[in-house]
Amino acid sequence: MSDKHHKAGHSVRDAFTSNLGMLAATLGSAVGLGNIWKFPSMTGTNGGASFLFVYLACTVVVGLPVMISEIMLGRTVKANAITTLRKLSPKGQPWGIVGISGVVAAFLILCFYTEVAGWVFAYIFKGISGSILTTDPTIASAAFADLISDPVQSIGWQWFVIIFVSIIITFGISKGIEKVTIKLMPILFLLLLVICGRSLTLPGAEKGLEFLFAPDFSKISGSVILMAMGLAFFKLSIGMGTMMTYGSYFKNSQNIPLTATRVVLADLLISLLAGIAIFPAVFAYGFDVSAGPSLLFITIPAVFASMPMGHLFAVLFFVLTAVAATGAMLSLFEVPVAYLCEARQMSRKAATLTTALLIMLLGAPAALSSSLTKDVKVFGMNFFDLFDFLSSNLCMPAGGLLICIFTGWVFGKDRFKAELSNHGLIKNEKVVDVLFFLIKYVSPLLVAIVMMNMLKVF
Ligand code: PHE
């Protein structure tokens, strides 16, 4: 099939130009702080290998089918998430709301994500100066507390990140996102391998590997499953319009199930490598694996400080994390930017500026969660945790559930098969049958059960 759909309106719509570019950008979206900050800290606090096992199950049964469906819906219409769902909705059905909730989720995530990314960028510089490299947990905690409890530094680093990502976004899809992610992904992978090599050659590394890979199933509980499911959504950038938006830049000749499978596998590999980089070192030096979110900013610098050549590796580690966060933030920005350009007829620059200003405004309460707004609690959470909770545990699973229902029950099997086989050009009927069964029955049921459990329906 030709790429005639590439034309939206009068002008040619920007899109990814190569298969590798599509893969790099999509993987760049999936890989991020989720792999290096959330995955290890959640695995650490939820019992290691058994959490990993539940996470894997959620990824296969829910993550992959939802990702494939979203990319497919986006490519079918070749528009932003809201327009895509509005156009595909039968008359009188309000599926556009799912797109709107996606844009809201993108903002919610960006509000806290840009803050954590800001800390990461700050830690590159602090790593170079050596100021965070200490084996004394009290000094390491104080250094991190200094950063997050200083309103000027918190906001400053957040703005730095927002401006940095906005600049790349203004260059567009092929010259901005694609060009940058194609260069960043190999760098990220190489840096990660180097750090894994260092971690694995430390004495006592086996303990960390055991923690990551030997499951204790007694640790699995309802809340562990909810967390693992939330992480799967967050990790794969699904349930909130990102994959639909990126899918709209896919070529008609792209094999969507194959690309998505590669992305999921590579993302998983990077999470595991992050675990292999972190846990053996944490065990080798006797630190606490269940330090939670501060694992990355307190435990890891301390771990590096205690190893030979730790200074260099600490800087490399934070560069790697910054690289990963950048690819993910590009894809988060693109959700509102694409909508503002296409549906509100803004220029790309104006759309980027609007998005950036909104994130600065809405993100400030999250950035100040450990300083000026630290006593403000909503549902018992500060703004930072609230935005994280609302996006990962509510908006994304709810969005994912509705995408399953839409794809399985409204979009329908015939169009699903036609789109995923590129109108008969790819022979993948059996695979697509299984995918459709998952998306129509299994994935929505699972997400619904987990969400009802969270809302305490039973
Ligand atoms: N997947 C990204 C990560 O792991 C986060 C993200 C979520 C990006 C949703 C885009 C959309 O860090």
Image (cartoon, grey):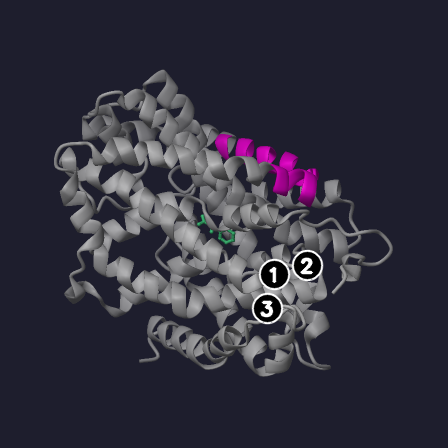
Q: Establish if 394 lies above or below 406.
A: above
Please report the residue visible at 38 percent of the width from the left and 53 percent of the height from the top. 268
Question: For the residues carrying marks 2 and 3, which lies nearer the camera in this image?
Answer: 2
Question: For the residues carrying marks 3 and 1, which lies nearer the camera in this image?
Answer: 1
User: Residue 133 appears at what percent x and percent y?
Assistant: 27, 23
> Which residue position is annotated with label 1?
244
Residue type (three-letter) at the residue carrying disc 2: Asn
Q: Establish if 184 lies above or below 112.
A: above
| Label 1, residues with CA under 10 Å away: few <14, some 14-19, many ≥20 | many
The dominant secondary structure in magenta is helix
Query: Magenta part of the protein: which range?
Result: 157-179
Residue type (three-letter) at the residue carrying disc 3: Val
Residue that protrudes farthest toward the right in the picture: 10
- Residue 98, label in figure: 3
> Which residue position is annotated with label 2?
80
Please report the residue visible at 67 percent of the width from the left and 60 percent of the height from the top. 253
> Can you say which quadrant of the picture contains the N terminus?
bottom right
Q: Are marks 2 and 1 in contact (CB under 8 Å)?
A: yes
Considering only order in the chain, which callout, 1 or 3, is on the residue closer to the N terminus?
3
Name the element at disc 3. helix
Q: Is residue 381 magenta?
A: no
284 relative position to 106: left or right: left
Considering only order in the chain, which callout, 1 or 2, is on the residue closer to the N terminus?
2
**Label 3, label 1: how far apart the Cα atoms are:** 11 Å
Please report the residue visible at 33 percent of the width from the left and 44 percent of the height from the top. 273
**Residue 14 visible in image:** yes
Q: 239 or 259: which is nearer to us? A: 259
